[in-house]
Image (tube, rainbow, N blue to C red):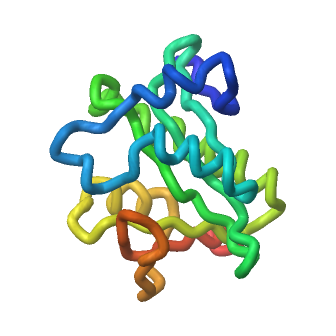
């Protein structure tokens, strides 16, 4: 595997926008197309494609929320046809390290829907813990998890 991250650009935005989760997961996350548009108009967000070599396997959006200064992994998905192959558990640590270095932070927040137990388990394996808060800021609401690398 040659896992890496690429910024969404004029060269790859259509490919990334067309990636999608399985039908039964669509209530868990906003579409990539909507997220890419959001990152174009809200400068705090960065959109990236997740790749294995030249194959786009997923998408992520992260950023530092201006009003709080918190760093969020606001979107993370693996395309339906690449799920179950171990990509999420292998590329997410690469993405988290990238975010930690980019923002020089020890704390990364995300939210996950209450019934997305597979994602919750993945995030917990990587050091995320529920902090008791709920996130209602987007189209999809979720339970807030935080990863404090100073304690990992």
Would residue 38 be found to the left or right of residue 128 on screen? right
Q: Is the residue 79 above or below the residue 54 in the image?
A: below
Quarter occupied by the C terminus? bottom right
Q: Is the residue 148 above or below the residue 52 in the image?
A: below
- Toward the top, the furthest residue is 54
- Residue drawn at the location 58% of the way across and 31% of the way down: 49
Across the whole image, how many numbered discs are drawn on residues? 0
Front in this rendered view, residue 49 or 92: 49
Q: Which quadrant of the figure has residue 123? A: bottom left
Would residue 28 be found to the left or right of residue 68 on screen? left
Front in this rendered view, residue 62 or 37: 37
Where residue 48 appears, x then y in whole percent?
A: 62, 37
- Toward the bottom, the furthest residue is 132
- Residue drawn at the location 63% of the way across and 72% of the way down: 148
Front in this rendered view, residue 138 or 21: 138
Where residue 54 appears, x then y in whole percent?
A: 57, 11
Where residue 108 appears, x then y in whole percent?
A: 63, 66
Where residue 118 appears, x then y in whole percent?
A: 27, 54
Q: Which quadrant of the figure has residue 116? A: bottom left
- Residue drawn at the location 53% of the way across and 58% of the way down: 74
Would residue 35 be found to the left or right of residue 43 on screen? left
């Amino acid at each position: 595997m040659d896992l890496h991250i690429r910024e969404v650009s004029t060269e790859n935005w259509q490919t990334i926008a067309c990636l999608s989760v399985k039908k039964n997961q669509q209530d868990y996350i906003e579409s990539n197309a909507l997220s890419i548009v959001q990152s174009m108009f809200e400068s705090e967000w960065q959109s990236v494609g997740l790749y294995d070599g030249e194959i786009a396997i997923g998408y992520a959006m992260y950023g530092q929320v201006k009003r709080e200064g918190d760093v969020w992994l606001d979107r993370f998905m693996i395309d339906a046809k690449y799920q179950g192959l171990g990509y999420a558990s292998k590329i997410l640590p690469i993405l988290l390290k990238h975010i930690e270095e980019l923002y020089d932070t020890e704390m990364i927040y995300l939210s996950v829907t209450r019934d997305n137990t597979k994602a919750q388990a993945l995030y917990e394996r990587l050091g995320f813990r529920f902090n008791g808060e709920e996130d209602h800021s987007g189209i999809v609401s979720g339970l807030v998890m935080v990863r404090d690398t100073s304690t990992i």
